[in-house]
Image (spheres, grey):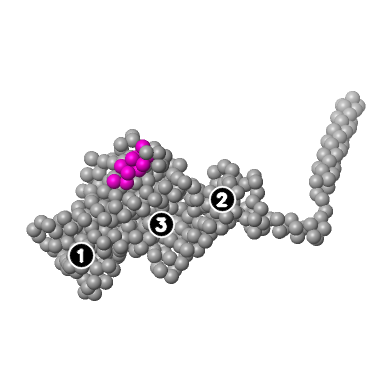
């Protein structure tokens, strides 16, 4: 009987606790419900339409939000939130025109331009840390992954035969790097006079634009001047895409009609063994002399070695096609995300663009002048037009050399000869980047 009474009391206590808990939950739910009811305000159709209009991009451009932040979480000026965005959208339309109508490297220019268009859409914050352009940028540009993969793909598409058959054309690739170091000196001098305000590391990262090598520019900027990475990447890829506009006037100004008509012949056949040994030899030299350059040179030579081995065609095909195409899309969109008005229309970016065009122009001129100097010595003559291909824009610069040459003689095919200094320029820019990085380690 006693145990029965204890059990009954226990059961009653459980029922009472459960009822109290249920009433508490009910009260809490009622409070939440009342809170929701209190915060929600019914609106008329006119008010709803007015709220919709206030959320449009047109309203955001005309009446910018004073509290709007950029992709870095900093406040933006009213100019960048309104007319700046309009200007950048018009600039991206101009890039579309150059890519589609003029055919100026659409593989690069279209993703960059479209990324720039998306980055300047108000309200959406697509280029922000949680926007998909911001995610792409942090995924592969901020950590140097995309440049290294691009170098693998370029290596798989590169033939060192023209360079090995005529090794002296490597001097043209080396001469074109003068634009890098010349611009570095110029940037430091301008800083000393107060015209610009860049540190030595920033000036070094900017000067690499002279090599017209986007992956290398991103790689060195992430090491030496990550705060300028976006502007440097945009400038480098923009000038790469505009090689057909920038280089021809320089080439014509520095050469005579007779020099442009010089015909070159292939000196000898390059064996498969030579093509296999060369990438390993270059990588070993980089490891021994300049380890800082090995991430880029190693990726470049890895891709080329797979190609020349002839036993991994599936991997070679992936590097040359699907992988590099996929990464090019992401890289272009990531670079384009830095075309946002608040990041592009600023004095530092404009100074970087100015120094970049000087670096690229000096590199082009140095290659042409080196070819003219080499022709003063005995031996087979070199068409100075291929000297401009010493910059690293593969194969764009070589195509431009061939195109300009054929304007003066339709039978003068310079493409394969121009590929010699072109691939030498790729190696040269990676070496230059390694030198600059090692100076600050």
Residue 183 included in the magenta stretch of the image? yes
* Magenta-tinted stretch: 182-192
* Residue positioned 49% across, 53% down in the render: 339
**Alpha-carbon span between mark 3 and mark 2:** 21 Å
- Label 1 Cα neighbours within 10 Å, binned few <14 / some 14-19 / many ≥20: few
If the image is split into quadrants, where does the C terminus sit?
A: top left
Residue receiving disc 3? 238
Query: Is 170 rendered above or below residue 401?
Result: above
**Alpha-carbon span between mark 2 and mark 1:** 47 Å
Residue receiving disc 2? 80
* Residue positioned 14% across, 62% down in the render: 381
- Label 2 Cα neighbours within 10 Å, binned few <14 / some 14-19 / many ≥20: many
Measured as percent of width and height from the top left, residue 96 is found at: 47, 65
Image position of 5 (left or right of 261) = right
Q: Earlier in the sequence, mark 2 or mark 1?
A: 2
Residue receiving disc 1? 256
* Residue positioned 26% across, 64% down in the render: 252
Residue 243 quadrant: bottom left
What numbered label is drawn on residue 370?
Answer: none
């Amino acid at each position: 009987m006693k145990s029965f009474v204890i059990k009954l009391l226990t059961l009653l206590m459980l029922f009472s606790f459960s009822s109290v808990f249920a009433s508490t939950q009910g009260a809490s739910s009622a409070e939440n419900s009342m809170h929701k009811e209190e915060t929600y305000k019914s609106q008329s159709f006119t008010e709803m339409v007015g709220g919709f209009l206030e959320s449009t991009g047109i309203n955001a451009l005309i009446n910018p939000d004073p509290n709007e932040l950029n992709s870095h979480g900093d406040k933006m000026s009213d100019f960048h939130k309104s007319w700046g965005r309009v200007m950048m959208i018009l600039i991206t339309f101009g890039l579309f025109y150059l890519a589609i109508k003029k055919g100026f490297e659409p593989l690069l220019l279209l993703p960059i331009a479209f990324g720039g268009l998306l980055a300047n859409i108000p309200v959406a914050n697509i280029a922000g840390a949680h926007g998909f352009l911001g995610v792409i940028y942090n995924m592969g540009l901020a950590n140097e992954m995309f440049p290294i993969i691009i170098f693998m793909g370029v290596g798989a598409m590169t033939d060192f035969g023209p360079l090995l058959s005529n090794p002296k054309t490597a001097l043209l690739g080396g001469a074109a790097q003068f634009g890098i170091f010349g611009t570095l000196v110029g940037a430091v001098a301008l800083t000393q006079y107060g015209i610009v305000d860049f540190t030595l590391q920033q000036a070094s990262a900017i000067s690499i634009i002279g090599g017209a090598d986007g992956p290398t520019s991103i790689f060195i900027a992430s090491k030496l001047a990550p705060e300028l990475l976006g502007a440097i990447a945009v400038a480098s890829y923009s000038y790469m895409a505009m090689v057909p506009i920038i280089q021809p006037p320089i080439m014509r100004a520095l050469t005579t009609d007779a020099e442009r008509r010089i015909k070159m012949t292939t000196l000898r056949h390059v064996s498969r063994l030579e093509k296999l040994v060369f990438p390993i030899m270059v990588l070993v030299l980089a490891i021994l002399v300049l380890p800082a350059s090995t991430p880029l040179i190693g990726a470049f030579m890895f891709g080329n070695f797979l190609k020349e081995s002839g036993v991994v065609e599936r991997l070679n095909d992936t590097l040359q096609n699907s992988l590099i195409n996929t990464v090019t899309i992401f890289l272009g969109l990531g670079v384009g995300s830095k075309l946002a008005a608040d990041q592009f229309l600023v004095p530092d970016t404009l100074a970087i663009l100015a120094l970049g065009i000087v670096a690229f122009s000096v590199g082009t001129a140095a290659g042409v002048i080196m070819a003219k100097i080499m022709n003063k010595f005995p031996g087979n003559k070199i068409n100075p037009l291929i000297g401009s291909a010493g910059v690293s824009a593969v194969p764009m610069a070589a195509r431009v050399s061939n195109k300009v040459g054929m304007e003066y003689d339709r039978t003068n095919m310079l493409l394969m000869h121009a590929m010699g200094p072109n691939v030498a320029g790729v190696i040269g820019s990676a070496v230059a980047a390694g030198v600059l990085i090692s100076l600050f380690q």
